[in-house]
Amino acid sequence: MRRQVRHPDLVRKHHERSELEDALRAEVAGDVDFGATARALTTMDASNYRRVPVGVVAPRDAGDVAAVLSVCRERGVPVVARGGGTSIAGQATGTGVVLDFTRHMRAVVSVDHAARTAVVQPGVVLDRLRDAVRPYGLTFGPDPSTHSRCTLGGMIGNNACGAHSVAWGTTADNVRGLDVLTYGGERLRLGREWQGAPAGLRELVEGRLALLRTGYPAGLPRRISGYALDALLPERGADVARSYCGSEGTLGVLTEATVRLVPLPASPVLAVLGYADESAAADAAAGLLTLGPLTVEGMAADLVRGASGLPRGGAWLFVEMDGEPAARGLIAAADALDASLVTDPAGQRALWRIREDAAGTATRMPGGGDAWPGWEDCAVPPARLGAYLRAFRALLAEHGLRGTPYGHFGDGCIHVRIDFDLYTGKGVGRFREFSEAVADLVVAHGGSLSGEHGDGQARAELLPRMYGPELVSVFGAVKDVWDPDGGLNPGMLVRPAPLDTNLRFQGLPLVGREPARCVGVAKCRVEGPTSGPEVMCPSYRATGEERHSTRGRARLLHEMALGEVITDGWRSEEVKEALDLCLSCKGCRSDCPVGVDMAAYKAEFLDRHYADRRRPRSHLTMGRLPEWLRLFGPALNIARMLPARFAGVTPERKLPRVAALTFVSWFGARLEEAVDVLLWPDTFTNHLAPGVGRSAVRVLHAAGLGVGLPPGRVCCGLTYVSTGQLDRARKAMRRTLDVMEPKLGHPVVVLEPSCAATLRTDLPELLPDDPRARTLASSVRTFAEALEEFAPAWEPPRLDHPVAGQTHCHQHAVLGDGADRRLRERMGLVGELSGGCCGLAGNFGFEPGHYEVSVACAEDQLLPAVRAADDDAVLLADGFSCRTQLDDLTGRRARHLAEVLAEALRER
């Protein structure tokens, strides 16, 4: 008789949660956290589902895992293993104790390059394994688009695949041995020929050989649904390790894995094939497999949305080949409408980013609206893909839904996000109806309900439609052999909860819709070196803690809106603590595939959190800096001599020196014969760095442009926004619009990137009903944009020097740096500026408690780039904070681009 674990509600009802926590602390060396923050951070993965855990444990080793299982088994509490939390079907959520393997059990234990194997712990991120074996010319073949943050344990649990599966197969094809612990406490080493099989498994399988030989669909390279019991057939080597892959944590808890490695391609080349439409691309994909491609990925124009660098067509196949001759041969044989060959690694990365970000970008429908997982990754035989897609598009239209299919066309596997209404009962009903209908469609085409991400709660209920009730009953019997108490991830795969329950939108008030935009793909959790100018998420990269990632903060805001785990709403200390280390860099606005703008959420939260309450001193000093500078000017330099606490500043910092002569005073009442552009006298330029303004005037004059100032005192409101004083921000913005009204529509050059970004985005967002805000926002130009647009024939002086420094995080996120790059190239400045955030970030780096994180952010990209620069390199940083940080931490003076140009003009 199978004994079911108790529901965690009973644990809470009988006040046993505290006793469970105490028992775990007594037995576990790792981290035990039953607090509201830890629980809120793990209520969701990247799916539509939400389940509230009792607590979270980060084990240090297999002994800790065994101890957790023992304590939980004694009390009938379920256990859920969790890696990066990027699962699409809900299987990384649970109502018991969640095991977080990403904190401690994340090592590459060993590499045997001769045998082409590696031993890894379950929490190691895929890219860290690939980094470790790259010096040997090897890699791990499966590569999901979340490769920079997904874990090997999660990949094994879901039998993950990725773009290269046409060459190297699924994770199950690349596993050689697994160490697992059962809920009952048994330690097993899984391998071939029944190695490690729990008692009773062999007898169960051998009594159903005929069913296992005939019950699985044939011709499917991507069959992930259900348990892979056919791997236990004698003719397939009775491979227990392989059969465990894709079991979604329902059979055992993985503690170590031996995986196969494959040689890196010698010279990967990307062939991009254009076709008239999606169906034509899908029909062509299967025919390319005989040519030995490494990838055959497909996407249509409704996903790409204006991306450049693609050949003609309405849909494309991204086909990677090893070597240019092979790629050219493929293009010749492909019969595509148009094609291009990309050999440059940077060009390849740019195109692959379109595909890798699709799990996020596909959640935003053209013209607005959200799209969600729910029918995310079915697979059909590759030869049937074109017919299936045509029928699938028709089914979407029949149900009044929209979606953007893309994915692994060479394997017949399709990803799609669909604009389900998951907030209302009617919408959830349509979600169920469509899920049932599309399941039947997949089965009719000989397909699998899941082709990559697993069944979880999203599809497990529908497995009888694919396998029939007899084989599904065998799945239940196998679960009971491995886990007779039902303690591991209950409700997944076997005896599942209905697909329309536990939805994370249930009970969510309207105020929570915006934080819910985060879909959990966790691009903000990337660690280690980055391959481009990305900024997101500097605080997570500094601390490594989920609560300091964009996703973590969005989860906490979501739970705050629901009010179940975080119960004190806008007064929440848990949310305040998580947002405290947000630098408001806005990197997530551009780098997050769904554009979560955590800086805006932080400002809104602080505004409400401190309503009618005493604010931190830094909000009154640095948050209201424009007022103090206007009232007292250089007299504020006296404050530099006072103890830091009086100004709300950390003792490691000194306040910037206020200039004796402001930029506006220097400019005076001069009259230009013709004013082509207005130069915005932002607070930082006007009072703290007037030399930047003077330099900009000289350069703009040299370029033949007449320069004027706004007709009165103006302020973008940045310091008020960043400290969450939104009423003051709106007041400053309205006053500025009144001043600017006679000049609205005139080009406005803003030298400080953070101020330009505030005018471009925060101004119209905070004053949505004032059309003047949109007019002013559209008039804003950066310094380089103004020169390019209004003085296109001007030739800047050439410096012919290397360059180092940083692109301001707000410029990267909001403004773009294309004009700056082109201007630097014309100046002969060679090299790239670093990405990331300088770490000072306006008031952030000055505030008490932020210094260490501020320095860690600078050490991530900026400081190493500056140290590695040549002695004669031009050091650029357009942001006042960036220049201040460099001066504080290195003693080196960086300059605004306008200063560099002005000096070069003087020398010329």
Image (tube, rainbow, N blue to C red):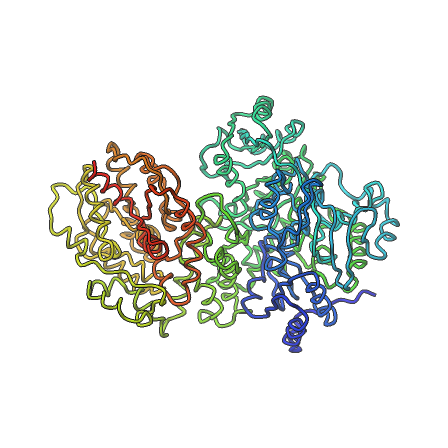
Instruction: Determine the residue located farthest toward the bottom in the rendered image.
Output: 15
- Name which quarter of the figure residue 188 lies in: bottom right
Residue 137 relative to residue 557: left or right: right
Q: Quadrant of the N terminus?
A: bottom right
Q: Residue at x 58, y 62 (%)?
A: 42
| Vertical order, 769 against 213 (above or below) | below
In the rendered image, residue 756, in percent from the top left (x then y), is placed at 31, 50
Left or right, residue 705 beside residue 291: left
| Quarter of the image that includes the C terminus | top left
Q: Residue 217's x, y, as percent?
A: 75, 41
Quarter of the figure with residue 722:
bottom left
Is residue 339 visible in the rendered structure shown here? yes
Left or right: where 308 falls relative to 29: left
**Which residue is found at the position 33% from the left and 65% from the top?**
725
Residue 830, percent from left and from top: 36, 37
Q: Is residue 708 above or below residue 703?
A: below
Farthest residue, direction front? 871
> Residue 56, image x and y in percent?
61, 65
Q: Is residue 500 visible?
A: no
